[in-house]
Amino acid sequence: MLLTYIFLLLSLGIVGLVFIPSSQKLIMRQFALGITSAVFVFSLFLWLGFDQSTCKFQFVVDSLWLPLANINLILGVDGISLFFIILTTLIFPLCLLASWSFDKGSVKSYLISFLSMELVLLLVFTNLDLLFFYIFFETVLIPMFLVIGIWGSRQRKIRAAYMFFLYTLLGSLFMLIGIVYIYLFAGTTDYEALSVIGFSSYDQKWLWLAFFASFAAKVPMLPVHIWLPEAHVEAPTAGSVILAGILLKLGSYGFLRFSLGLLPLASVYFTPLVFSLSLFGVVYTSLTAIRQTDLKRLIAYTSVAHMNLVMIGLFTGTVIGIEAAVLQSLSHGFVSSALFLIIGVLYDRWHSRVVKYYGGLTHTMPIFITIFLFFTMANLGLPGTSSFVGEFLLLVSAFEANTTACFFAATSMILGGGYSLWLFNRIAYGNVKIVGVDLSFREFVLFLPLVLGTLFMGIYPNIFFSPMHATVANVVWVDLWM
Amino acid sequence: MKFALIFQNDTAAFLPELFLATSLLVVLLHGSFLGGSAASLYTYLTPSIVRLTSTILFLSLLLVLNNPVESQTLWNALFVTDHLAIWAKFVVFLGLLFCVSVSEAYMFSARFRAYEIFVFIIGIGLSLCLLISSYDLLSIYLSMEFLSLIFYVLASWKKNSYFSAEAGLKYFILGSVASLFFLFGASLIYFTMGTTNLGALALLTENLVTSSPFLYLGLIFVVSALLFKLGAAPYHMWIADVYEGAPTLISFIFAVVPKFSIFVVVSRLIFTSFWSFFPSLWEDFFCICGLLSLSIGCLCGLGETKIKRLLAFSSVGHVGFLCLGLASGSIEGLQAVFFYLLIYMLTAAFLWIYVLLLDLDTTSNRTLLTFADAIGLAKSNPLLGLIVVLMIFSLAGIPPLGGFFAKLNIFVSLVDASFYLIAVFTVLTSVISAFYYIRLIKIFYFEKNEKWFFFAPLSKGSATVLVLTALTVCFFICSPNLFYLLAYKIGLGLLV
């Protein structure tokens, strides 16, 4: 029932926003913020009421959709999706808070796009039916395309919107053929039924490749990663935060749930492919990040690096690896969102993202620079922050799987230091190039949950690991025993 | 046929057609006596004739749905009535009702005073009903000629436009050649089999061991002529020019109304009479047509800058999808095709009415609509802009809109028949064609307009149709049962 309430509340929010007159901008923003915060509180109840002892799906909502084709809408939460849901519901209020003064175009359409994106993302993470997962996976493209294209900052936004749309569409259509094949073979698209029906090794390999096409474009893995720097740079601040914080997780969530969960033999078979692409991705994008002159593009490339590291962890086939991958995804959700929000603060003041123009900010914006320092350290994996836990455990699991892979993956920490520290140094220290007003109360409140979350995950990660144990052990059991 | 039962059976089943024929004459007389003479003070006839025509179409829709006879062949096996025929006629009348609803405002702005266009619309309804019910190659030919003649005249309606004349002439010449091929193919089939009746042909070809090349040739000619009318490649050349040149209301009729009926005829031919030729002929034929149509639809659409031509090429692409659905040869394929046609008809109706709205404002000397005409939509009518965006996404096949489910069904039938490479090719062309759909959205929303644009307010008729079609397609995901069950019923109702 809790899930139904969450979705009802969001739908009511969207309908309510339609009826508020367009001139009442403050009321619209407050209303949207209230709805998304309420949804966040509800999702915390999901965590409270979660039973950690079982790998079965909880809070299940099952409703008929098309009985004659045996496709129904089933929603449920388990150890993996729980934290993605909480991440989503946390990031959206922060986004809305960040775009409080954003007045380009129609505020009402902006808020409605964001609320519908939240609805669709929550539906993606809770869906247990393959076809509906695909439907909502693709539906996210529509509001995101509009957000990048309408509220983006400069002309290049059109190219970015096209690239975002077409790269993900191409991959996903291949996945559609895979889903259609599964439906015809098994007679159902229900995840729980499919995890019991096995596929032959040959079938699994083709299906894995079809699913890989789609999820690889979303993660993003190396040959099809180029939409990410474009889309992140051109989107408005809140759009970038959603992209980095949540949409990238769709790829790794899809890999975990469907490629590893339903197609274990093929996952083991294709592990060298994933490892190679991810390692290339990590090293290449970290090196490219060092060269960037645009703030957002730099953080976008670091996002690619982190997500590729997550991919290495997922395909190690160990419990540590997968749990660390999920935690690193969460941590990346916090840290990357915070970094984009930081850049948003700078952009709000000076409307420029060129690194060269910023320098010596610590003299006039000390609180801002403290938070920036904290997240820079989180980005490189300082012990005490969540991303250290994630990266360290990922390296442990990679070492178990393949020591060479671990060696190259470990360079990510070193290169991470390179780009993060250099960026921070140029902006914060040195001669004062630019003088600014420090963080307002709204912006401070914006960063507070992210700081607390990162510290919490870094100091006591067990709370986050415990719900995952049962589900991940189930996935690995299927992997190891097949 | 039992002559004693003519009035009991055959006439009863043909009530809609008889009603349409009579009402056509009535409207013709009404218009000619009441509007054209100085004595009647040159009355402005359009409002009354619009209402009269809508009433006639609505009543014939009721007549069709309340068919008193069961599925059987009529009139000495020239015609047939079954569930497919009933629902196909329903769809035709629905399309014509859409057209008549939006026509009043269009006729007023475009200064069409001729009432005969409504006589022609009723004539289109009559000919399509006859075409749908046809069960003999000759009756198909005659109904098709009836339909085509009306279409040729309608395409060249705008007397002060070179493009309209070009459209009418091109359509006439090419359409006549297509009809010639149909007749030639039908005569080859008659030469081989000795009959032109579809039911008799089904029985004769049921256990065919050897077949003559004349039969194959005849079939290819016949189906090619039918695919010409649809605009499938490689017979698509006329579509762009005709859709662009004809007055927008007429293009709307061309795009929305005949497709369902001609697909009914095609499926009667390939599923009822020549079912045994599936592995040898129809699979390859429709696969090739489908793949060619998809490629042409996606590649030619990329280069277009005019809206009507873009919609024409997108319809070529959609017909490609439909041909592939037929190629799979299964009942799921046929049901997928009918489902897709229903959804496509609704989406195309919406977009063509939108183009009509744009056309109403070009009171300037420019005769053709380019993309630039649509730029101010987001500011002047935000709700319409959002819905147009959603409908374009539905055409491109993005979930959760209706168009996605239509494409999903076609994919299911393709993979079911193990056409994997074709499915991959379809995916690639879908993505390429998605580009020119989102380019339209870019133009509506992302570009800054330097000039002020003004859109005429929507008339009541067009607003009703737009809202109904938009609600059906956008909220399709909430209740898919109706469309699926209807498509299944139609597919199963094909009288074998």
Image: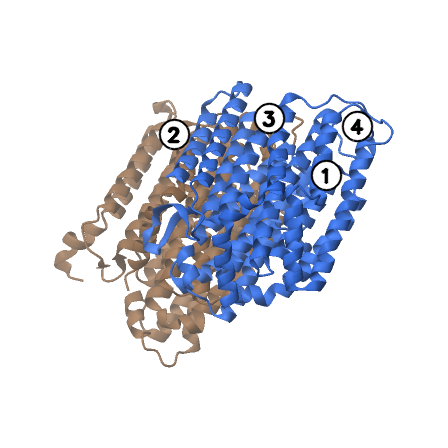
Chain colours: A blue, B brown
Secondary structure type for disc 3? loop
Letter of the chain that mark 3 sits on in the rendering: B
Q: Mark 4, mark 2: which one is toward the viewer?
A: 4
Q: Is residue A340 above or below residue B459?
A: below
> How far is the residue under mark 4 from the one under mark 1?
15 Å
Q: Position of residue A188 (x, y in %)?
A: 39, 58
Rounded to the nearest angstrom, the CA distance separating label 4 from label 2 is 73 Å
Badge 3 amino acid: Phe
Which residue shows up at 76% across the image and 42% down it? A420
Task: State the residue position of label 2.
Answer: B46
> Does residue B146 appear in the picture of this structure?
no
Residue A204 vertical position relative to residue B449 in the rendered view, above or below: below
Chain assignment, label 1 = A
Q: Residue at x 57, y 61 (%)?
A: A317
* Sooner in the amino-acid sequence: mark 3 or mark 2: 2
Amino acid beneath label 1: Thr
Cβ atoms at labels 3 and 1 below 8 Å apart: no
Q: Residue A169 in the image: x percent, y percent?
A: 57, 50
Q: How many marks?
A: 4
Q: CA distance from mark 2 to mark 1?
A: 72 Å
Quarter the C terminus of chain B occupies: bottom left
Specify the amino acid type for callout 2: Thr
Asked whether, in this view, residue A45 is left or right of residue A343, the answer is left
**Location of residue A162 by image quarter:** top right
Q: Which residue is mark 3?
A: B453
The residue identified by callout 4 is: A361
Query: Image quarter for residue B24?
Result: top left
Decide which of B416, A78 is in the foreground and name it: A78
